[in-house]
Structure formats: C-alpha cells, structure tokens
Image: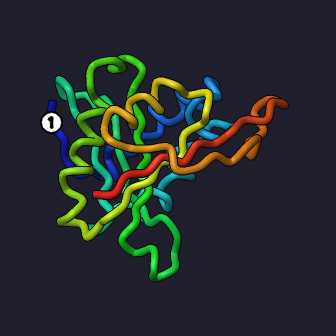
Amino acid sequence: MRIRDALESDLPAIVDIYNATVPTRMVTAELELTTVEARMPWFRAHTSDRHPFWVMEIDGQIAGWLSVQSFLPRCAYRGTAELSVYVDQRFRRRGVARTLLERAIARASSLEINAMVGFVFAHNEPSLKLFERLGFERWGLLPRVAQLDGIGRDLTIVGRHV
C-alpha cells in the first residue's frame, strides 16, 4: 500500500471508482455517471497544499482515494474540512478507507484543520461504523434530503475534532 498525492493522470481511475458507486445509491447523491472531462475542473479545485487529494495504490493500481476540501467558504469555518473517501470495489474490506482516513487525521494539524466532517447516507451503515471506529461522532441528521429513485434518504453528518 502506498498513499500519494493524486495526479491528473489518475483521474480516469478516480472517476471509475466514483462511477461504480453511483448505481448503488449508497455513497453519492449523483444519479448519473460522470466523465473525466466533466470532473477535470472539480479535480483541479480539490488539489491544493491545504486541501490535499490522495490516492492509495496497491500493486500499482489505484485502490481508493480521499479528498480533503473546504467545509464552507466563510472565514470562521477555515479550520473545518470535509472528507470524501471512495474505494474501488475490488479492494474493499482491505483497510483502504481506514488507512486513508487515518492519514487525514494524522495530517490535520499540519493542514491547519481542527475539525473534520463527513456526510454519509444514514443507510450506509458500513461507512458510518468506519467513521465511528476512527473517533467520529454523529453530529447531525438531515432527514430525507436526498431523493434516490423516489426514496427520501437521510444524510448523517459525522464529525471529529482533531
């Protein structure tokens, strides 16, 4: 396992991992698949020294990725970051997400982050359990804010001070 900064050349694999989650309706509120071209501006906006974007490689393949992004644009929220983590289905249950999240937690201080939040569908129990094992608490619930195939889904806000 090797964690490194994501490169533009990684974007096809990043998009493939992301797109594989769309039909599951477990991880993302996107309802349609995306493309590398559509995600290029997003990728460029999510790669900076203060808000890194990491990939994990296993045997030369990208097994997962994690982005650290601004929570809200107001200055008072500068020390709070939102985390997003995605794992290739071939590498699930191998500690990829846990290792990426542990890296973010360990690096929080050097990134001037004092609080981390994640937005997880309430029906995504495996992700909620992972965050909780890493010291995140359930800070909020937004009931039925997502409509996935005609079903109102709750969004759980998890957070941790670091």
Q: Position of residue 82 (x, y in %)?
A: 44, 56
Say whether residue 127 is visible.
Answer: yes
Task: Tell me what residue is drawn at x 36 percent, y 20 percent.
Answer: 92
> The residue under label 1 is which amino acid type?
Arg
Task: Tell me what residue is drawn at x 19 percent, y 56 percent.
Answer: 107
Say whether residue 44 is visible.
Answer: no
Observer-nearest of 36 and 71: 71
Residue found farthest to the right: 150
Residue 23 position (above or below residue 137): above
Location of the C terminus (image quadrant): bottom left
Residue 10 position (above or below residue 46): above
In the displayed structure image, the side of residue 143 where residue 38 appears, left or right: left
Q: Which residue is mark 1?
A: 2
Observer-nearest of 105 and 12: 105
Task: Tell me what residue is drawn at x 32 percent, y 20 percent.
Answer: 91
Disc 1 residue crowd, few under 14, some 14–19, many 20+, Cα 10 Å: few
Residue 113 position (above or below residue 92): below
Q: Position of residue 103 (x, y in %)?
A: 21, 46
Q: Position of residue 155 (x, y in %)?
A: 63, 42
Q: Secondary structure at mark 1?
A: strand
Q: Quadrant of residue 65?
A: top left
Task: Tell me what residue is drawn at x 34 percent, y 34 percent.
Answer: 64
Q: Position of residue 44 (x, y in %)?
A: 41, 62
Observer-nearest of 147 and 53: 147
Location of the N terminus (image quadrant): top left
Q: Quadrant of residue 52?
A: bottom left
In the displayed structure image, the side of residue 88 where residue 124 appears, left or right: right
